[in-house]
Structures are given as C-alpha cells and as structure tokens.
Image (cartoon, coloured by chain):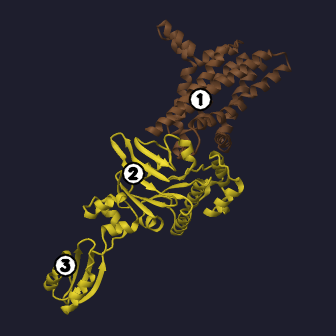
Amino acid sequence: MIEVINLTKQYGDKKAVDNISFKADDGEVLGFLGPNGAGKSTTMNILTGYISCTDGKALIDGVDILEDPIKAKQKIGYLPELPPLYMDMTVKEYLYFVYDLKKCKLPKISHLKDICSLVRIEHVYNRIIKNLSKGYRQRVGLAQALIGNPKVLILDEPTVGLDPKQIIEIRTLIKKLGKNHTVILSSHILSEVQAVCDKIVVINEGKIVANDTEEHLSQKLSGEHKLSAQIEGDRDKILRTIQGIKGIDKVVCDAEHKNNVCDFRIEAKEGVDIRRELFKKVAENGWYILELKTSELSLEDIFLKLTMGEAVPALDNAAGGEEND
Amino acid sequence: MGAIFRREVRAYFTSPIGYIFLAAFYAYAGIMFANNSLESGYTKLDSVFSTLLIIIIVLIPILTMRTISEEKRSRTDQCLLTAPVSLTSIVAGKFLAAFLIYLIAVAITGVFAVVVSAFGTPDWNVVIGNIVALALVGGAYIAIGIFCSSFTENQVVSAVICFIALIFVSFLSTIGNLIPFEWVTAVCEKVSFGERYYAFTYGLFDFSNVVFFLSAIAAFLFLTVRVLEKRRWG
C-alpha cells in the first residue's frame, strides 16, 4: 500500500532523511518511532506531498507522489503534528470546507456525521475551533483526515498534548481505524507504538535503525539466551559450575547480597535455552535459585539502545530487519 | 478552487479586514467624489478615478497580506497542499476571493455615476472604461500582493513589501524620468502601471493596456505558484 524506496531529503548540508526504505501493507498499522528531530515529520511530509524529496521514491497504492500528486493525495488522509485548523471557523464549517476541498463524492451529511461520531465531536460541531481545547482540536484534525475515507492515514504524533483518558481513546480509535485503513503513525512515545502498531520502524538521525515487529525486535535484542538469576550458594563455585554448562557464552556476577546470595548475568549462545540445565546443576549442588528470568528488553530499552548508538551486536540484525521478515 | 474561494471570501468577513478595506475605500472614494465632482459641479468622473489609484496602493496590501503568509504561519497550508488540488487552483481561488471583495469596493463608483447622471449626462463609455480600468489595475495589484504574501510568514512584512512594490510599479515612469538614459525612461514609462491606468482616465480605451494588466495578473499568479512549488522543493 505504501512503499518508500531510498528516500532522501537534504536541507543544505544536512540530510534530514537519509536513504530510507520501508513498506506498509494493506490494513497494517506501522509505527514510526524516533527521538525528536529524527526525521519522522519530514518523511511524513514527503509521503503526503507537502514537501518533495531530494532523491528516492514514495509510492501510495502504486502511485508516485511526485509524478501524480493529485491522484496520490486522494488516497491519503493526513493529520500533521499541528492540526491544520482554521481557527475562525466552526467545526462544521471546517469539515464542510475540507469535504469540498477534497472533492469528496460520498453523501456529505451522513459521511460527516459518521466521522464526527467516530471521533466523538458531535457535541462541539457548531462551536468555533478557536474555543476548543487541545484534545478536541486534535480530534477535529483527525476527522479532517478521515474525510473521503482515504485508504491511507498518516498521523503525525496524534496523541501529543492529550490527557491520559483522551490518549487511550485516540489509541483505541486508531486501532479500530487500522482494520480498514493502512495507518502510519509517528511517535516518540514508545508505549503508544507498542500498544497500537503491528510493525515498527525506528528512525534516528534520518536513518532507519530497525524495521520489524515489536516481538521480533525484543527477541533480536534479547531473548531466552540471556538470563538473570539470583542464586544462593558459594559464588565462585556457582560461577565455575555455570561456566561448565554446554552452550554458555558468558557468566558474570553482578552483585553480592547477604547470606551467600548473588545476582548472576548469564548469556548463552543464541538460540540455546539453558534454563533447565541450569536448574538441574544448581539443585544437584544443593544451591537454591531464588529468582530466574529472561532479560527481555522492553521497547524502551530497545529504543534507547538503537538511538543512543550503543554497540549492541544484535543491532545489526535488527537494522537489517527487512531481509529477516 | 471553489472551496478555497468560498472560504477566503468568508474569512474576509469573519475578520475585520474585509470591513476595514471596504469602509476605508468607500470613505476615501466618497470624499474624493464630493470634492472633485459634487462640490465643483463637474460631471466627468475622470479626476475621481485618477485619485483612486492612491487609495488602492494603500489598501490592497491590507487585503492581500494574509492570503498565503497566514496559512504558512498557522500551518493550515498543510491542509491545502496535501489535499488533491493543484497549486494553481489554490492560488486562483485566493485571487478570485480578494478580487471579489475589491469589486464590491469598486462598485461604489457605479453609484457615483448614477448620482452624477441626476445632474447632467455623464459620458457612459468613459465611465465604464474607467471602472474596467480600475478593476484591472486592482486585479494586477492583488496578484502582486498575493505574490508578496507568498514570501513570508509575517503578515506585516508581507504588507510592507507589497506596499513598496505597488508604489514602485505605479510610479515607475516618475522614477524613469530621473534616470539619464533615454531608453530606460522609455521602458519605465511603458511598464508603469500608473501611466497605463491614467491613460484610461483621459478617456482612452487602449486595448493594449487591457492586455497589459491581464498579463500582469497572470504573470504574478504564475510566479506565486512557482514560489509555493519552490518552497516544496527547498
């Protein structure tokens, strides 16, 4: 549905977007994640035809946004970071205006009514936009994007500035919309992407650093081969014993507590699950496992690892996520 | 284009700009009419029309200053530029809306002619020629105003640039006279908007002047489209 091929945008010497490629299929919610200034909004502005790219291609449902912008724009509903609202209009006037602007063919009154009930703005329908709260303005912006029932929805940080209740509502709505539309959603809020998106593209300094599903990302960066354990027993003996287990890569004692209790970080070779073997060895020696868990990274950790430029071996795999799909 | 035109016309009257523009124009035109025609019992309106050029130089920047700069400032241009409409129709919609407001203002001169006809017989051909000329020169100034508005996000800056540009194109022949090269003076006289407008008030309906103003409108609207296009590529 959306295909971005080697997209580059250059402002003077600075590359705001540097040779990125990704794809969003029909009915998929794609999360576009990155710190502020990573190039998220620039990419979205290119996708919607607001600005042009220096190099590369963006295809919306097979139509190149630069070659046939009008046809491509018909397929897109866009909610920019700051909803493009005319403050002097009422919600009704504004939505009528957008309806006419998009040359929408659907039955006007019922279509707008459906959208308003979907984003829950019926009761502010006749109010002037200037007097609406941020949350309502955001919803009017979303309503504007939905007019004409576009196949693709591009939402730039749709929940910024909303209160927690509104955030949950908008997220639920986006999930619902994702069933019938292809949605690209940008955010620097990780939990949001985690909650809503099927697929995640992490972008940093204009480059894609990861492109995969959230589960895959977590697995790649951590998983069963990395364990943290709290074991009661003689520290050195435990270290030696664990070292002896087949498939072990590294074992370190992180901390020592009272009563011979130590925290260990254990890394096995990728794909090797040593939890059973570990349990057996510990039991044989009369020690006790007080705690054992796989060190699954949260999206937050992944994000930080990816964007702080920390050298994580698994990172390379993640960055090449497209091939791994 | 229709949607943008309707929104723009509406915006002129939901903000004070439309009212201020019309009120100022009517007030100035009324005083000039009273002074140059009613008081002196002069049934030809040529002097009224020639004085109106000054007020449109002052007022048109106010009419056009917000057209594009305000859209940029409030980011509503994202709504227009990502909608399935061409840049040309966006610019044309804005031009036609401003032009409509301007025509409402210019219409007052028709009332003057009717008032004059109660006291004598005005030369209707000349009056109509003058009204058309006023509409054309105003159209060209609006196109210049929209062009100036496309450069900046600041309405005041846009108005000032436009004001300077309008003074320049209106009095180009006067500026040309100061330059000691004959051909420069001749060229300045040819492209002076004021000179071409005054030709109408003398009672000369020269078709080349009509073509000149229409070309100016087309040229500046085209340039505005290019500025918007360039901004996308910047």
* Crowding at mark 2 (Cα within 10 Å: few <14, some 14-19, many 20+): some
Q: Chain of mark 3?
A: A
Identify which residue, B154 or A265, lies in the foreground: A265
Q: Chain of mark 1?
A: B
Q: Is residue B205 rendered to the left or right of residue A8? A: right
- Which amino acid type corresponds to the residue marked 1 in the rendered image? Ala
Image: B172 above or below B77? above
Identify which residue, B31 or A271, lies in the foreground: A271
- Give how far apart the Cα atoms at labels 2 and 1 are: 41 Å
Q: Which chain is brown?
A: B
The secondary structure type at the circle numbered 3 is loop
Residue mark closest to the camera, 3 vs 2: 3
x then y, percent, for residue B170 = 58, 20
* Crowding at mark 3 (Cα within 10 Å: few <14, some 14-19, many 20+): few
Q: Which chain is yellow?
A: A
Residue at 63 percent across and 37 percent down: it is B93
Q: Is residue B155 rendered to the left or right of residue B134? A: left
- Give how far apart the Cα atoms at labels 3 and 2 are: 41 Å
Corner quadrant of residue B126: top right
Residue at 20 percent across and 76 percent down: it is A247
The residue that label 1 is drawn on is B143
Mark linked to residue A246: 3
Identify which residue, A89 or B83, lies in the foreground: B83
x then y, percent, for residue A99 = 65, 49
Q: Earlier in the sequence, mark 3 or mark 2?
A: 2
The secondary structure type at the circle numbered 2 is strand
- Which amino acid type corresponds to the residue marked 2 in the rendered image? Ser
Q: Residue furthest right?
A: B118
The residue that label 2 is drawn on is A21
Image: B77 above or below B128? below
